[in-house]
Image (tube, rainbow, N blue to C red):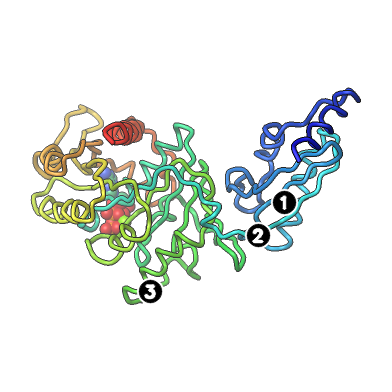
Amino acid sequence: MVRGYLKETMNKVKEGKPMITEAQIRTELAKVFVPVVEQSVADLNLVRKIDITADNITITLASTALTPDVQNFVAAGVRSALQPLKTPVAVEFVEAKPQELNNIKNIIAVMSGKGGVGKSLVTALMAIALRRQGKNVGILDADITGGSIPRMFGISTRPYGSETGLLPVVSESGIEIMSMNLLLPQEETAVIWRAPMLSKAIQQFWTDVVWGKLDYLLIDLPPGTADAPLTVMQSIPIAGVIIVSTPQGLVEMIVKKAIDMAQKMEKPILGIVENMSYFQTPDTQKKYQLFGAGKGESLAKAANAPLLGQLPIDPELTRLCDNGDIEHYTDVSVASLGKALQTALETRNKSG
Ligand SMILES: Nc1ncnc2c1ncn2[C@@H]1O[C@H](COP(=O)(O)OP(=O)(O)OP(=O)(O)O)[C@@H](O)[C@H]1O
Ligand SMILES: [Mg+2]
């Protein structure tokens, strides 16, 4: 096999044709996009095999989530991208499970225990911060009955897919999103299911969605310490959790239950984010702690984790969430959230 390839290579060299490398082909394939989702075959990790001989190139792609029409479109895209190499190209498709294609470096769940403290907002801002750093990021909305992520990102596109899998919907800045809200006939439609069905839906967002290659997959959890967090902690290989809190004492008490749950489930707490910590007047810049002095530091201590950030109450943030423009939030607190998370992950990885 190797000898044959070497012989072909030498013949090519003799003929004066430059040898095509796999790296060269991968660079070209990164420019081939799957229609509708606007993600490349490389990002979705659909490239299964690349065969190069002296006379032709064969590209094997996973057909997962792609209908025959889309497969034809993608195959044509591959052939056209590789045309400059001046070698005949064959494109083949093989079946693969979404799980075989998913290659995700860090899976992080965002939880609180308490409702309405800003878990979805923190998930969104964290994803935006990481995306701005050039990372490949996805959000799995595990709040099946009350999903708010699509609304914050202004997304209502139905996810595209086939019997073999679903593709996430991609936001303006390139964040992959999967949410039950996107699968409902209307975003106001109620999902009235018992817990086992909800758990099944969360599991399917993990097993049946082609997330592809991601640096971060953030999981937005619903409030509470019951079924959804349990399903996520038991069936998805999360690297850790981020805990969201607000300064009120009552919230602190409930958030401590979430910390307790993560510790009992032996999931590392990567950090605490305190939301609605203060309000800063736009004219005098004076800060007011509307809900009292923050408990972020003491919660962080209790969780033996860093305080990743303290977010202000910002009417601009409310407006952007409501209008689906969260990706346009430019406050400095966003960038520092992303940096703090990365530092927390690095510290944890170093310590074992
Ligand atoms: N720091 C903030 N400044 C301004 N508005 C905020 C802030 N945090 C949250 N909000 C507003 O509160 C709304 C609810 O926040 P969010 O949906 O993130 O809470 P949640 O904890 O995910 O709620 P649930 O428990 O229902 O999942 C947001 O859509 C936003 O409008
Ligand atoms: Mg939420």
* Residue 11 located left or right of residue 313: right
What kind of residue is marked 1?
A: Val
Note whether ligand 2 is within 8 Å of mark 2: no
N-terminal of the pair, mark 1 or mark 2, is 2
Residue shown at the point (24%, 65%) measured from the top left: 226
Which residue position is annotated with label 2? 66
Tag 1 or tag 3, which sits nearer the N-term?
A: 1
The quadrant in which the N terminus is found is top right
Q: Amino acid at mark 2?
A: Leu
Quarter occupied by the C terminus: top left
Q: Is residue 104 visible?
A: yes
Q: Earlier in the sequence, mark 2 or mark 3?
A: 2
* For the residues bearing labels 1 and 2, Cβ distance under 8 angstroms: yes
User: Image quadrant of residue 312?
Assistant: top left
Q: Are marks 3 and 1 in contact (CB under 8 Å)?
A: no
Give the left or right position of residue 303, taking residue 104 as reference: left
Left/right of residue 109 with respect to residue 324 in the rendered view: left
Which residue extends farthest right? 15
Which one is in front, 93 or 211? 93
Picture layout, residue 66 above or below residue 279: below
Look at mark 1 in the image and give the residue it sits on: 74
CA gap, disc 3 and disc 1: 35 Å
Are there few (<14), some (14-19), or many (20+) residues within 10 Å of tag 2? many
Q: Nearer the viewer, residue 114 or 230?
A: 230
The residue drawn where x is 91% and y is 25% is 15
The residue singled out by tag 3 in the image is 197
Q: Amino acid at mark 3?
A: Met
Q: Identify the image quadrant of residue 222.
A: bottom left
Instruction: Categorize mark 1 by other alpha carbons within 10 Å: few (<14), some (14-19), many (20+).
Output: many
